[in-house]
Image (cartoon, coloured by chain):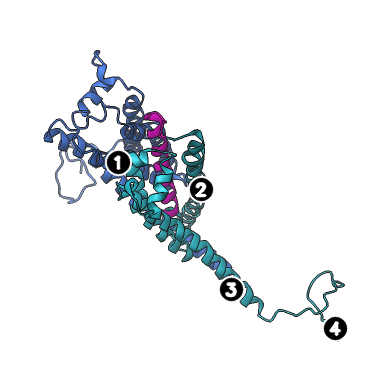
Chain colours: A blue, B cyan
């Protein structure tokens, strides 16, 4: 085990790795950095999703004349483009503005708080995620039901209807549903444990 | 302590109660019946509040022509009268119909389930009450915001504006807020206990 053949820790033992250089950093160092980086990336995605609400939907909620923009300002362009799937955005439909306003003003900041709560393991983490998810689901329900009641004729073509109106909003049904089911289960389990604990204490 | 003077269990001991007749039923009997009756009354109120959503708001959501009713049908009369405070009900505003539809179809049955869950001490009791309360709050927010965006000019007079539009809806802000704060605290406490329990188990 000298010269060109360097010992390695892998299995099978007879695997030949000429010129192998062992880990220079410790295991805890490597795994720790990896874990923290992963957490940062996930947090960043969460943070961005919260900021998405605040910036993208906040701009829409408080810019009634976005469709008159001539500067090519990106946020105005986004909503001009999305209005091809649902012209109620350009028409300033009250239901749409109310839902997007609530999303921007309440749920955006709540998402940022949720990132913090999850990272710090706060006890209100699950109930906050549940509240945000339910808000998203309720808002999406109002969004689709009002469109249905008003005739469901707001898309420039069936392409835009399915790509923007249905497709882009599907994630606002699927993801909050999954999160709220998860939180519901976690919270029920915690309450169950506490109730059983109290019963035991009383019996003693 | 004989003849006309009957001993009684009350304080002060020298209190005179001529002709006093002691309890004929046992303490557990009296307190038990009282407790069950109270529970029934409270449950009945809850049940009625759930049925209110399903019957009153369900009728509105699925009866677009209620204001043409000539028979004096009570549910039609209710919405004809309420429309004096908010004519969007008679005008079939999509936002109002969407919110009332969700309330009747989802929250009404959820209220009935909550009565059952509270009575049986189910572990999902708090999270269900929280979900219903949040739905009520979101719906009420959409209700008021859409009215504001559409000009807030739907009441027949300022009397109907404050009595019906503001007053009758105030309870849909106050009560769900109180319930959701209570549930939030209960759930956080339960999660906290569970997290601490897990930490202790790990340390062992």
Residue farthest to the top, as pictured: A71
Quarter of the rendering occupied by the N terminus of chain A: top left
Q: Which residue is mark 2?
A: B175
| Residue A181 vertical position relative to residue A96 in the rendered view, above or below | below
Of discs 3 and 4, which sits in the foreground?
4
Q: Which residue is mark 3?
A: B33
Q: Is residue A113 visible?
A: yes
Q: Residues within 10 Å of mark 2 (few under 14, many from 20)?
A: few
Residues at discs 4 and 1 both on one chain: no
Q: Which residue is mark 4?
A: B4
Q: Main secondary structure of the magenta part?
A: helix
Left or right: A105 in relation to A161: right
- Please give the chain letter of the residue carrying mark 2: B
Q: Which residue is mark 1?
A: A140
Residue at image x 47%, y 61%? B118
Residues at discs 4 and 2 both on one chain: yes
- Please give the chain letter of the residue carrying mark 4: B
Residue B144 highlighted magenta (yes or no)? yes
């Amino acid at each position: 085990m000298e010269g060109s053949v360097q010992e390695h820790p892998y299995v099978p033992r007879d695997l030949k790795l000429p010129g192998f250089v062992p880990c220079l950093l410790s295991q805890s160092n490597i795994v720790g950095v990896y874990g923290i980086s992963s957490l940062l990336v996930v947090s960043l995605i969460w943070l961005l999703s919260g900021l998405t609400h605040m910036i993208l939907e906040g701009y829409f909620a408080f810019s009634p004349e976005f469709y008159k923009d001539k500067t090519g300002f990106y946020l105005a362009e986004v909503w001009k483009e999305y209005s091809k799937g649902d012209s109620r955005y350009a028409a300033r439909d009250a239901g749409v503005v109310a839902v997007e306003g609530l999303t921007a003003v309440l749920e955006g900041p709540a998402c940022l708080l949720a990132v913090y709560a999850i990272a710090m393991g706060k006890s209100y983490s699950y109930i906050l995620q549940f509240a945000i998810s339910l808000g998203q689901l309720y808002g999406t329900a109002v969004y689709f039901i009002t469109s249905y009641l008003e005739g469901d004729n707001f898309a420039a073509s069936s392409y835009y209807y399915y790509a923007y109106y249905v497709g882009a909003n599907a994630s606002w049904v699927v993801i909050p549903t999954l999160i709220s089911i998860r939180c519901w289960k976690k919270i029920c389990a915690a309450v169950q444990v506490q109730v059983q604990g109290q019963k035991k204490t009383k019996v003693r």
